[in-house]
Image: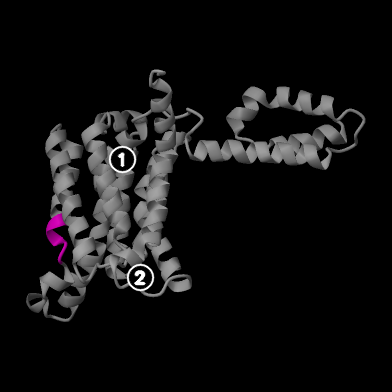
Amino acid sequence: MTELERRYRRLLALYPRDHRERHGEEMLDVLLAGSAGRARPGPRAAADVLWGAVRLHLRRVAAVDGGLVPGDVPAVVALLGPLALLTGVTTGLHEIAWWIKAGALWDMPWATQFPDAPLWVVWAAVAVLVLFTRLRRVAAAGAWAATAGSLLLETAWDRFWGTGYNTGWVLLGALTAAALTWSPGPARGRELLPGRAVPVMIATVVAAVALGVLVGGGLQFPVLVAGTVAACCHGTRTGRRAALVLALPAVSTLSAFALMVWVLPPPTTPVDGTLIRCLPVLLALLALGFPALVRRRRADQPLT
């Protein structure tokens, strides 16, 4: 192997593996033919190879290369979304634990300390319906009701107003409700995931909630991310994007914290949280392959 070939192979290693397996040797032959007589790739040729790798990875992140089956990612979200959402009850349970420790549980003002308690009861019921029954429409109705209640608290309640910390939970709730309503459904999600996915997700939620209640400090979010990756990421793009959707609460909270510490002043109105909300929404659209769906729909439209 010549030095030129060795250097080109290192550059081509930056492309996705499946792309290299299909087109790597052909690309290498073209590059070697265009660099005959050189000992190493020229700057322009190397930049072209690098830019091609970057573009391909970006296209795959946005799912514009047609590599995802429409509806598969939402089907996984429909199955695991209600479980992942139950991690959001951690803050409320932490409040209860604090009042129990203080011996004043019956004096706790629920309306201010745990105002979203009824919503988490609904999400628990939705999770049971998804996992153990075929009442998908009932589960979808419950998911929409819980999402509407969460949105009301997020925008109108003083405790939640404009902080952006709960945006990820509201967004994941809306995506889960939409997935239960319009995707192929939880049954399809079970087909796409290994058998361990649901038990791993249940264990993740239990561990995350327990850690968050006992220790606090937002430690439930790293556990949620690790658990969703373990449950969904089994070598498929569908699984990786589903994991990204299910991890949106962690991403949203992290972005909210980072922006408010380093960029924005403390928000006082919902308008102040606009930037905080944009990042998780964008990630959700990319993870679900929305650009590909839009492009496909436009391509299917008849010419006029």
Residue 221 placement (x, y as % from top left): 37, 59
Residue 271 placement (x, y as % from top left): 32, 64
Secondary structure at numbered mark 1 = helix
Residue most toward the right? 37
Q: Nearer the viewer, residue 69 or 18?
A: 69
Q: Residue at x 39, y 31 (%)?
A: 293
Magenta stretch bounds: 115-119
Q: Residue at x 22, y 37 (%)?
A: 180
- Which quadrant is home to the C terminus? top left
Main SS of residues in magenta: helix
Within the magenta stretch, is there residue 117? yes
Label 2 Cα neighbours within 10 Å, binned few <14 / some 14-19 / many ≥20:
few
Q: What amino acid does circle 2 point to?
A: Gly
Q: Nearer the viewer, residue 218 or 234?
A: 218
> Which mark is on residue 217?
2
Report which quarter residue 150 is drawn in. Answer: bottom left
Q: What amino acid does circle 1 point to?
A: Val
Residue 184 placement (x, y as % from top left): 27, 28
Instruction: Count the marks.
Output: 2
Which is more foreground, mark 1 or mark 2?
1
- Which quadrant is home to the N terminus? top right
Within the magenta stretch, is there residue 116? yes
The figure's colour scheme reads: one colour
> Which mark is on residue 77?
1
